[in-house]
Image (cartoon, rainbow, N blue to C red):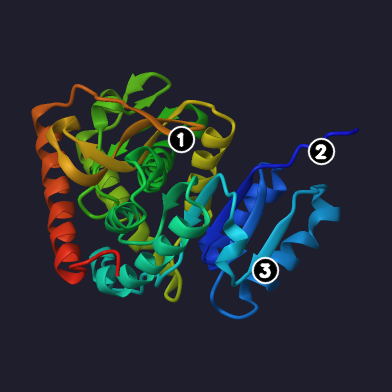
Amino acid sequence: MRIVKKRRKVSIIGAGNVGATTAQKIVENGLADVVLLDIRDGVAQGKSLDILEAGPLMGFDTRIVGTGHYEEIADSSVVVVTAGFSRKPGMSRDDLLHKNGEIIRDVAHNIRKFAPDSIIIPVTNPMDLMAYVLWRVTGFPRERVIGMGGALDSSRFAYFLSEETRTSVSNIHSLVMGGHGDQMVPLLDFSTVAGVPVRKIIPADRLEAIVTRTRNGGAEIVHLMKDSSAYFAPAAAIYSMIESILHDRHRIIPSSVLLEGEYGIRGAFVGVPVRLGNQGLEEIIQLPLSAEESSQLAHSAAVIAEGISALNRLFNNFSE
């Protein structure tokens, strides 16, 4: 009797630009079958059909199902959460806290019910705080709630460094830690161009400008697009995390995880370099930060902690 090996399943909650683009990347690369879920009638179904109709042209046989029913996410290896409101011009990530908190709480209840063994990748902004909601409501161990943020911020930083030095992006290694927002911490001492620390080849004033642009990377795109936020680069960041998890690559990717004393921080989701494999978070990499970097990271974590306090006031009982 022939044994048919099923592909792994990735479910994406939210069929907006980020969710749909992530789904497209996954199926076009044959990484996994996808369930694309959205509560808006027909949106996930229509986008899924559109992606499938590209299969004969792109040469993929991976499957994608569009649905509005959470039962479809059962047996998912990874669940990506992109549902919620996106940023509008002039809106900070923290402005989204109240709007998206209730949405993500409901999503978390359904993940806990229908995909209790999955690894969750929170994407919805404010991401570090929505990761906290997902962790609290699902009761999952911290190894299985891994926020996308650092991967995107580090990629933006790398691109800006590449642009400044006129060097291939393949020669750039960059690292951004801290919250996925204005208080992120690009680490200059751990960012290199062909192995050379960026401080040695880029003037201080230009580096300062690049750091500022990195911190405002999402807002810059919102300002340019007016009625939308970034989705191509976020989808690529999500894909890189899923690929490392499903293929057990053990890649070190900056991600937002619950810290339990690492870097002197406890009880907050903060972006740090982590090793990702098929069990999710395998290891938090602790780097010897300078006093200035440690101070910036502590400040970023304090901002996140304030948001968590606001969440705790907003949701006295996360299980409701």
In three-dimensional space, the C-alpha distance between marks 1 and 3, rounded to whole angstroms, equals 37 Å
* Side of 131 relative to 59 (left or right): left
Would you say the residues marked 3 and 2 are in contact, meaning their CB atoms lie under 8 Å apart?
no
Among numbered discs 1 and 2, the one appearing first in the sequence: 2
Among numbered discs 1 and 3, the one appearing first in the sequence: 3
* Side of 66 relative to 121 (left or right): right
The residue that label 2 is drawn on is 4
Circle 3 or circle 2, nearest the eye:
2
- Label 3, secondary structure: give it: helix
The residue that label 1 is drawn on is 166
- Label 1, secondary structure: give it: loop
Among numbered discs 3 and 2, the one appearing first in the sequence: 2
Would you say the residues marked 1 and 2 are in contact, meaning their CB atoms lie under 8 Å apart?
no
Which residue is depicted at the point 45% across and 66% down?
Answer: 83
Q: What amino acid is found at the position of numbered circle 2 in the picture? A: Val
Q: Give the image location of residue 301, x and y in percent.
A: 16, 46
Outermost residue, right side = 1
Q: What amino acid is found at the position of numbered circle 3 in the picture? A: Lys
Quarter the C terminus occupies: bottom left
28 in relation to 107, above or below = above
Q: Give the image location of residue 152, x and y in percent.
A: 41, 46
**Residue 47: mark in rendering:** 3
